[in-house]
Amino acid sequence: MTASPRTVNVGGQHPYTITIGPGLLNDGAALAAQVRGRHVLLVSDSIVAPRYAAAVRESLHAARPDLRIGTYVLPAGEQSKTLANFGAAIDALATLGATRDACIFALGGGVVGDLAGFAAACWMRGVDCVQLPTTLLSMVDSSVGGKTAVDIPQGKNLVGAFHPPRAVFADTDTLRTLPPRELRAGLAEVIKYGAIRDAAFFDWLTAQRQALLAGEPAALAEAIARSCEHKAEIVERDPLERGERALLNLGHTFGHAIETEQGYGGTGNDNLNHGEAVAVGLVLAARLSADLGIASAQDTNRIAALLQAFELPTEIPPGLAPQQLLARMRLDKKNLAGRLRLVLWRGVGHAEVVPDVDEARVLAVLSG
């Protein structure tokens, strides 16, 4: 028996629904219902497009034969989240003749979702975007909340815009083809939700480790739904990250510094991918919290042990200079007046934003 889809509603000024379940990419009626005009640009990458792009196009055309559907496929990997590829997506919209009632469908992981969402935010000052995440990480994080961006050599996500999606369809069938490394990377973001605000979820993840690592559909659907519920509640209250939403970045300031310093990308090489970098960042944030006396070393050990149980890294990769990582952290968007402003915690389930963090203490943690 096929499981019924689950829904999570995101409220606020621009409400939308997250639908989670199997077979959603084949539900042409539901997908086409999000398209207000006749123009659709399907944005995907070189790994995902060969697997799923044809099915999405066929689903849309079956429901709406009048649609004009263009496709833009970028090379897979974080290295492709650039201004140049953003420009190519804009060119694809222009070639399609996309009008203000056009819709972009972002079919892929976080790179595709971020870049396609940014193109949607900019084309004619904003057109609709429907997120079709195909990785666990994008299902629980980047597809929800409307943060869109591209990277530049100086840092991740420094050029972007807030642009909430019109809808999110998380087709859990796509997780069957997800490489184990990418599944584990997504679980790092799932663990983050337990760390910042839900100790019971943290414990549930501990108990469900084997089922989640094995990719059991029921366990993954529960993890996705609970993660999306947490993010939806926070985003609804703070859509532009002026307060509480910053808590979702626990571990990310450290993680982004590692990614930037490594030159981005974790597919087929020794560099950490985003989820792996976040895993290391979560441990570094916990260590700094303990060093500052706002959390216990026991809590640091708990999150490190859980991440290790999910086969995720917990140490800074060799060859990265602490001073260079600190320099990258100075460009983080949460900083104010040139002072570090970090998301730390008081223990499992209790994250907070800590302003004016002493750089010497951060450097000590980066130095191990």
Image: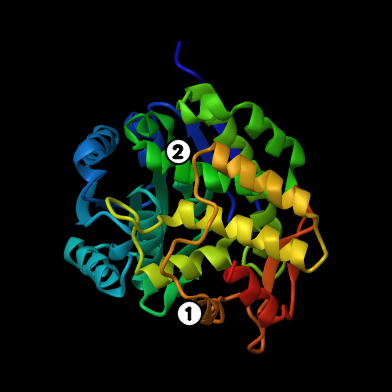
Question: Where is mark 2, residue-wise?
Answer: 170
Give the x, y percent position of residue 54.
20, 38
* Helix, strand or loop at mark 1: helix
Q: Residue 96's quadrant in the figure?
A: bottom left
Query: On the rendered image, what quadrant is the C terminus found in?
Result: bottom right
- In the image, what residue occupies the spot 23% across and 41% down? 53
- In the image, what residue occupies the spot 62% across and 56% down? 283
- Mark 2 or 1: the one toward you: 1
Give the x, y percent position of residue 237.
71, 58
Disc 1 marks which amino acid? Gln
Query: On the rendered image, what quadrant is the N terminus found in?
Result: top left
Q: Earlier in the sequence, mark 2 or mark 1?
A: 2
- Position of 360 with respect to 118 (left or right) is right
- In the image, what residue occupies the spot 43% across and 31% down? 172
Q: Residue 176's quadrant in the figure?
A: top left
Question: Where is mark 1, residue-wise?
Answer: 324
Q: CA distance from mark 2 to mark 1?
A: 37 Å
Give the x, y percent position of residue 363.
62, 76
